[in-house]
Image: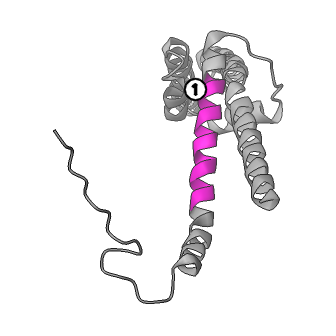
Amino acid sequence: MPAGWALRKLDSLGGAAVAAVGGGAASQWRAFLHQYLQRLGGHADEAVRNLDHLTELHDLAGPAEQPVLASMMSQGSARVEDLREALRVLTDAGPVMQPVAFLRHLDPAIARATLDGFQPALPLDTASLLWAGAGLVLTLVLYELVKGVLWAPVAVVKGMARKPRGRRRPGGDRAPRERIEPSL
């Protein structure tokens, strides 16, 4: 059947295309993470500068302004610690655990800015190639699962159409085979 052959080929092509897109997207994870880390480090440096500036202002301020500045310094100090901790955890995590560390210490504003200015890269390091392979396999498996779920009703209908409508013999459609005893 030429139509069946063509559908199988289109299915193979679709699976390959989905797998390629998944592998390519997963390979960009490390490039995104490096750009995120650069922004995170920049935010941490800026937070330290702001905290130093607030400390100077606190020392120069009069008694009326000092409580407000002390509150701002407390918030700034907490921000510096959060950013430094996120930077430390992400840098210390291995390639496999980095996505988990990223999600635990995610700063949505920094991630959004990173995504807005993201520059794709051609990663050739081992970790990026492993991520690309994992993404390829995962998306191909997801493709096959979705395809199976979507085509299941069609298979059921086709199976119902193939069943003979007449009465079946208890042992099946075929006559029982004779058993041949080996001779000695």
Residue 160 in picture, x, y percent from top left = 54, 79
Q: In this figure, which colouring scheme has been used for the structure?
A: one colour
Which of 65 and 14 lies nearest the eye of the viewer?
14
Residue at image coords 25%, 57%: 179
Residue 98 image position (x, y, % from top left): 53, 23
Q: Is residue 32 left or right of residue 88?
A: right
Q: Which residues are magenta?
A: 131-148
Indicate the amino acid at tag 1. Gly
Would you say 164 lies left or right of 61 here? left
In this rendering, the answer to whether 161 lies above or below 63 is: below
Q: Is residue 138 magenta?
A: yes
Q: Position of residue 79 (x, y in %)?
A: 56, 27
The residue nearer to you, when weighing 105 against 97, is 97
Q: Nearer the viewer, residue 68 or 140?
A: 140
Residue at image coords 72%, 33%: 25
Residue under pointer 1 = 76
Q: Is residue 55 above or below residue 18?
A: above
- The local crowd at label 1, few if under 14, some if 14 to 19, many if 20 or more residues have their Cα within 10 Å, is some
Is residue 50 visible in the rendered image? The answer is no
